[in-house]
Image (cartoon, rainbow, N blue to C red):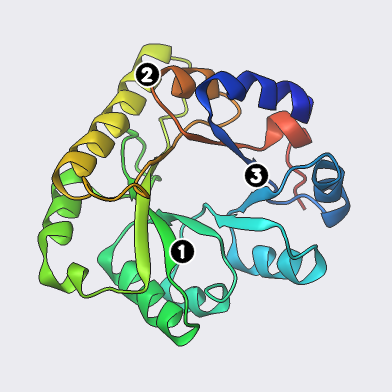
């Protein structure tokens, strides 16, 4: 485990922000980090995030980092801070629809499939480019794309992890140059977790998602 302040000091030179991944951890554990100044917390499951949102201080910025089903979107759009895991136009359209009902513009990241594992969700680059070129995307007024997210393959092969993170950074740069050149808000590269964040930092991450390193191993059951 690593102390919050120690980790923040590590992130400081690159101005990388920290999302503390609190999935499966109890509110009292989250409050220990909250009391030390942490405000950004990430959850994988909508139901768990709702329960914690209802119980906990309202200045917490909740990040949805797990796969989001369209039928769950309506439960979080009035308060979610950032959705990292937009992996289809269908989900984006639903977020836009529900955000309009809540009179909000919701920040979203496009999730790209950079890992070799079949279990990972995400856009293929060409699929995303085609969507961004479309009129149906331009008609979405209640979402704001602020960057990209990806998960590297879970492997001890650091060269492969680095290659995958570099691929995500290249996708970000292509999107920035071709679709979001005039939008300062398009600036996030959400990549790097407890096991691989040092490589992610070297490859240009602006936001890391750290769980077990801060909380210890996840509590199952």
Instruction: Identify residue for label 3.
Output: 21
- x 37%, y 73%: residue: 142
Provide the secondary structure element on which disc 1 rests.
loop
For the residues labelled 2 and 3, the Cα–Cα distance comes to: 22 Å
**Where residue 205 sits: x, y (%)?**
44, 30
Q: Nearer the viewer, residue 43 or 201?
A: 201
Provide the secondary structure element on which disc 3 rests.
strand
Q: Earlier in the sequence, mark 2 or mark 3?
A: 3
Q: Is residue 72 left or right of residue 213?
A: left
Say few, some or many: other residues with alpha carbon within 10 Å of mark 2 (under 14 / 14 to 19 / 20 or more).
some
Asked if the residues shown at circle 2 and circle 3 are in contact, with their CB atoms under 8 angstroms apart, the answer is no
Indicate the quadrant where residue 151 lies. Answer: top left
Q: Is residue 85 above or below residue 120?
A: below
**Number of numbered discs visible in the structure rendering:** 3
- x 19%, y 44%: residue: 125
Q: Nearer the viewer, residue 101 or 92?
A: 101
Instruction: Identify residue for label 2.
Output: 162
Provide the secondary structure element on which disc 2 rests.
helix
Q: Earlier in the sequence, mark 1 or mark 2?
A: 1
Say few, some or many: other residues with alpha carbon within 10 Å of mark 3 (under 14 / 14 to 19 / 20 or more).
many
For the residues labelled 1 and 2, the Cα–Cα distance comes to: 26 Å
**Where residue 89 sits: x, y (%)?**
26, 66
Q: Which mark is residue 180?
A: none
Q: Is residue 94 above or below residue 12?
A: below
Give the quadrant of the N terminus: top right
Q: Is residue 171 left or right of residue 149?
A: left
Instruction: Identify residue for label 1.
Output: 68
Say few, some or many: other residues with alpha carbon within 10 Å of mark 1 (under 14 / 14 to 19 / 20 or more).
some
Asked if the residues shown at circle 1 and circle 2 are in contact, with their CB atoms under 8 angstroms apart, the answer is no
């Amino acid at each position: 485990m690593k102390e919050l302040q120690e980790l923040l000091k590590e992130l400081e030179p690159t101005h990388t922000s920290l999302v503390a991944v609190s999935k499966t951890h109890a509110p009292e554990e989250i409050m220990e980090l909250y009391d030390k100044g942490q405000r950004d917390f990430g959850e994988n499951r909508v139901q768990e995030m709702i329960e914690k949102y209802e119980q906990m201080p309202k200045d917490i910025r909740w990040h949805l980092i797990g796969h989001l089903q369209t039928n769950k979107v309506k439960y979080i759009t009035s308060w979610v801070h950032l959705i990292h895991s937009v992996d289809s136009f269908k989900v984006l359209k639903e977020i836009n629809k529900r955000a309009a009902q809540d009179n909000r513009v919701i920040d979203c990241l496009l999730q790209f499939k950079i890992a070799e594992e079949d279990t990972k969700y995400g856009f293929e680059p060409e699929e995303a480019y085609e969507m961004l070129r479309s009129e149906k995307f331009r008609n979405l007024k209640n979402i704001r794309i602020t960057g990209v997210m990806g998960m590297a393959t879970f492997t001890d092969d650091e060269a492969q992890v680095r290659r995958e993170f570099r691929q995500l950074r290249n996708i970000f740069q292509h999107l920035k140059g071709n679709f979001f050149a005039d939008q300062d808000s398009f600036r996030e590269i959400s990549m790097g977790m407890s096991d691989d964040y040092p490589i992610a930092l070297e490859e240009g991450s602006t936001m890391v998602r750290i769980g077990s390193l801060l909380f210890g191993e996840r509590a199952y059951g």
